[in-house]
Image (cartoon, rainbow, N blue to C red):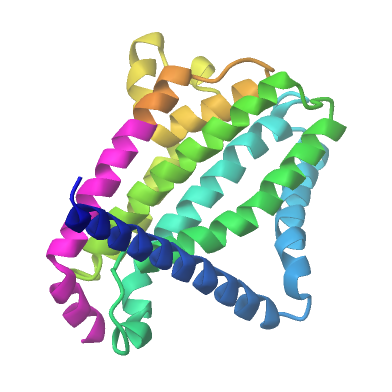
Amino acid sequence: MSATTINSGTQTFRKFYAFWQLVIIKVRLNLRSEATQSYLSYAWWVLEPLLMMAVFYVVFKILLHRGTEEFVNFLLCGIVPWLWFSKCVNQSGMAIMQGRGLISQVYLPKTFFPLVLIGQNLVKQIFVFLLLFVYLSYDGHPPTVQWLWLIPIILTQLTFITASSFIVAFLVPFARDIKYLVDAALRMMMFGSGIFYSYTQVIIPEHRDIFLMNPMANLIVSYRKVLLEDSMPLTMSLLGISMGSMVVIFFVYMLMKRFDNTLTRLALE
């Protein structure tokens, strides 16, 4: 291996390392800034999901007596992952335009902006998941060895979120009305993800494979299998979602590089 190749590889690694350092620093600064804008500061990261869970508990378990005794647990195992996904995708639509201040001062790869939003939401989602796990443990679903499957499930969802956020962040600057289409698509996708119902009870057997082609529906089924049924997730589906998402991430990354100057111009208009 020649010295030139080694030096080139070293420079690439340094750029990669510096890029991710910058993403982490920006995530920390944004989270700190967000916390200072509210009286309760960082405590709001815990109180917000806690209040959300309390509302679902009171409405569905106490007031409406909806479904079975497990319905609230069933609902939370669907709504918590879904809100993480929808929040990231929604916010990523305007990520590049909202970064125009930085874009006008220094060059940054355009993937930087959706990655910062994904990082911010990931930090806050950790607290949401912890509250969910505590609640489920209290309500008769204590941790078991099967809960280790949550690691690949969460990583798979993070990969899918990144792929989806990259697509939206790339497309919206070219036609900002796409943001409204994204909102509508997310609403449709929410009702097609089995958050409020069990697909085995609602979807006829002939259509279940089609239903599970929705990655979020697939992921929600896996969350419920691990947390509520103490069983293995849909492992092959997780692998397929991960691989497909990584292909999309690479493809959109290359598109962002190809149209970098155009995205810069659109952001500054």
From the viewer's perspective, tell me whether residue 10 is left or right of residue 259: right
The residue that appears at 23% across and 71% down in the rendered structure is 173
Please tell me whether residue 150 is drawn above or below residue 129 in the rendered image.
Answer: above
Where residue 148 appears, as percent x and y from the top left, is 65, 27
Give the number of marks. Answer: 0
Q: Residue, x 31% and y 56% (percent of image)?
A: 166
Could you tell me which quadrant the C terminus lies in? bottom left
Quarter containing the N terminus: top left
Q: Single out the residue that lies furthest toward the right.
A: 138
Residue in the foreground of this view, choosing between 190 and 27: 27
Q: Is residue 103 left or right of residue 190?
A: left
Residue 91 image point, x, y percent: 43, 65
- Was residue 259 drawn as part of the magenta stretch in this picture? yes
Position above or below: 68 against 177: above
Residue 181 appears in view: no
- Residue 38 picture location, percent across and down: 71, 80
The magenta stretch is: 242-269
Q: Residue 190 falls in which quadrant of the image?
A: top left
Residue 209 visible here: yes
Q: Give above or below for 233 relative to 132.
A: above
Q: Is residue 6 magenta?
A: no
Residue 66: percent from the left, percent from the top?
Answer: 71, 32
- The residue at the point 36 percent across, 84 percent down is 102
The one of 217 and 25 positioned closer to us in this rendering: 25
- Pick out the residue farthest to the top: 205
Residue at x-position 25% and y-position 47%: 250
Q: Is residue 86 above or below residue 26?
A: above
Q: Nearer the viewer, residue 160 or 214?
A: 160
Most frequent secondary structure within the magenta stretch? helix
